[in-house]
Amino acid sequence: MTMKSFILLALSLTSVHTTTAAGSAAHRCFCQVTGTLDDCACDVETIDRFNNKEIFPKLQKLLSSDYFRFYKVNLNNPCPFWTDHSQCGLKYCAVKPCTPGEVPEGLKSSSYKYSEAASQDLEECEKAEKLGAVNGSLSDETRQALQEWKKHDDESDRFCMLDDVDSPESQYVDLLLNPERFTGYKGPEAWRIWNSIYEENCLCVEKRAFFRLISGLHASINIHLSARYLLDENWFEMKWSHNVSEFQLRFDKELTEGEGPKRLRNLYFLYLIELRALAKILPYFERPAFHLYTGQPTEDNEKKKLLLELLHMAKLFPLHFDETALFAGNKKEAMKLKEDFKLTFKNISRIMDCVECFKCRLWGKLQTQGLGTALKILFSERQIEAMPNASNTNPSFQLSRQEIVSLFNAFGRISTSVRELDNFRSLLSNLKQ
């Protein structure tokens, strides 16, 4: 063999090895992220096309609007589960709350009502009317008790703990200015949070479904952290971008004892659950009485139109998840499962107050509240279908603004994760090893 032939052979072998290694890197993460999903009639490829081309662009436009970008939250709640709780000292863990002048007046006027009339003391009028219908001579103590009972009834329907938006500790946060990304929060403190969440699985009757939901949420958050990673920092700029090595550590089959690709499949399961909830909730938002009220009529009307377009699109998805298969059983068993999920997800939302990184706590609270709201919708199908169209009646099913904002932003995070998987597939396929 001549020297020239030897060199050409060596280069050829090197090229084959590099291509194979690069292909292997992508394969090790995505080897199971294809085809039909467990417990579903849907496949990964259909979700990818639907999300990336149809849902994602509209959803991002909606979430950039004032109604959805401002989220009121209490990041100072004490941890209810352990006392050795400290605050993260990393600078990227900090959250910048809004100043009063940055929040639209319409949002500040009422947290639970959605129309201009509501901002003009409609809530107080409704309370007075209801109380007056019982007894016009009720004492202040009795009135207060009735309001507490109503608050209790509202909370009993929820699948998560919501912050008291009227508390002085609660502040508005601009989600666009406080994006979810890698903050450096990791190690034993972070793992204690996730271990506590997964341990809630022991209390849940439908353990498999619960595990897949939490695993999907965990995977989605890990994708966000890998996609917005601080790669470089100097006096002039900070470069946040995709960290392929970080993604591999979390999802490579060989580096996760075979669990990584399964976690990604669970992300798609979570996507289908929340997409189904959006399709189911359409009648609630179609009511003429509902408005995305911020005090800016033109923008509010445009955003409601965009919201309805998005929900109609979600309803037309051809391979929806059939929740009746998951929540099958007689009426007594269904009620037990509903209460089981409520208790479990309420506990998880309380665990979020133990997260030491404020940025992580913000997005953790929002995403668990969003998932809890999606479950509330799926377990309330009859109330939603029976919802009256008349604007002067109060439907038995209600969502607070906090639930609405968390529902759509949580789905926005999952939608972003699905889209980011395409980016990581491409980066791993081109990776030289």
Image (cartoon, rainbow, N blue to C red):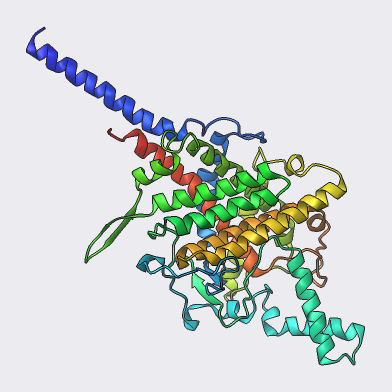
Left or right of 326 on screen, residue 331: right
Q: Position of residue 382 (x, y in %)?
A: 82, 54
- In the image, what residue occupies the spot 50% across and 37% down? 259
- In the image, what residue occupies the spot 69% across and 84% down? 120
Residue 281, visible in the rendered structure: no
- Count the labels in the image: 0
Of the 4 image quadrants, the one containing the N terminus is: top left
Q: Position of residue 294 (x, y in %)?
A: 59, 74
The residue positioned farthest toward the top in the image shown: 1
Q: Position of residue 352 (x, y in %)?
A: 56, 63
Of the 4 image quadrants, the one containing the C terminus is: top left
Q: Position of residue 47 (x, y in %)?
A: 56, 39
Q: Which is nearer the eye, 321 or 20?
A: 20
Residue 212, visible in the rendered structure: yes
Choose top left, top right, bottom left or bottom right for residue 147: bottom right
- In the image, what residue occupies the spot 12% across and 12% down? 5
Q: Which is nearer the eye, 55 or 166?
A: 166
